[in-house]
Structure formats: structure tokens, C-alpha cells
Amino acid sequence: MIPFVATDQEISHGRDITWTLRAKEAPQHIRQSWFGTSWIVEVPTTGTRAGRAFQATHLFLTSLRTTPEALLQLVRDRWSIECWHWIRDTQLHEDGHRYRGNGAGALASLRTAALNLLRLTGFQSIREGMQAVMHDIKALLEMAMRQPEHKTG
């Protein structure tokens, strides 16, 4: 029996994915092996990405005691962070750098600024944005000097 269920759907950026969280109370033998564990959680995801079928299942043990909807949001937030890190590593090769001391933090800040500038300028693809401006100092300076748009309403 699965007593806790929550579902959410994401339709954006060429994706139509449904996330379903199913959780049940952890049995005694798991709670004894992993102290504090409350729930066994399964999160199957199905849908399409760029028109291609997609399916994955994520399994978790957790000690959190919250609503199924809040737990699903936490799982989705985690993957949102992983997605951001994936972009940083695949496009900027961040994991390959071995800076020490203040250099690591300074370069991470510069990478974050660069990614945010590309997004603010309207690039949906970081790779395309980098290719568009990497050899164009004027375009880079224009991006850096761009004033943020103020939203009303």
C-alpha cells in the first residue's frame, strides 16, 4: 500500500514531464539500519524531451516528515540544482579546474555572472550564447553594461 502520493507536471523548454511521488513508511528493518529514516520514496518521471520519450525512476530514503507535495517539491528542487551544475560542468568544464584558495570562489563567481548575463540577454542555450560572444569583445561589453529590465505589475 502506498499511502502518500503527489503529482506535478512540467511543460517548458521542449519538455512535457510528469513527476509522481509515491511514499510509504519505512519498515522496521530499514529504520534500524538507517537511523531516523521515516519514508521510502519512489519518484517515477515520464514524458517527452524535445519530442523524444523519456522515463526515469528515482528512489530515496528520507527522515523528513512533511506533506507529499512538499517532499516532491524538494526532490524537484534538487534536480533543478543538479541541472544548473550540469550546465556549469559541460559548458564551462568547472569540475576539471583545480583552483585553490580564493581563486576557486572568484572564478565560480565569474562563471555565474557569465551564465546569468547570457540568460538575461535572451540566450536559451548557453553553448549558443558562448559561441556568439566568445570572440566578440564589443558584444561581451554590451552584455556587461546592459541594464536590467524592470517588470511592472
Image (spheres, rainbow, N blue to C red):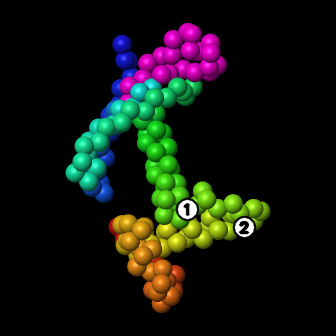
- 98 displayed left or right of 27: right
Q: Residue 37's quadrant in the figure?
A: top right
Q: Which residue is mark 1?
A: 93
Residue 134's place in the image compared with 21, above or below, is: below
Q: Amino acid at mark 2?
A: Gly
Along the line of sight, the residue nearer the viewer: 102 or 120: 102
Q: Mark 1: give few (<14), some (14-19) or many (20+) Cα within 10 Å.
A: few
Tell me if residue 48 can be seen.
Answer: yes
Quarter of the figure with the N terminus:
top left
Quarter of the figure with the C terminus:
bottom left
Q: Which residues are magenta?
A: 21-40
What residue is drawn where x is 46% and y is 33%?
Answer: 71
Residue 136's place in the image compared with 127, above or below, is: below
Q: Mark 2: give few (<14), some (14-19) or many (20+) Cα within 10 Å.
A: few
Q: Position of residue 144 (x, y in %)?
A: 52, 81
Kindly report the distance in space between the C-alpha atoms of the residues bearing marks 1 and 2: 16 Å
Furthest residue in direction front, as rendered: 96
Query: Mark 2: which secondary structure?
Result: helix
Furthest residue in direction bottom, as rendered: 138
Along the line of sight, the residue nearer the viewer: 126 or 22: 126
- Circle on res. 103: 2
- Are the two marked residues, 1 and 2, in contact with CB atoms closer than 8 angstroms? no
Q: Amino acid at mark 1?
A: His
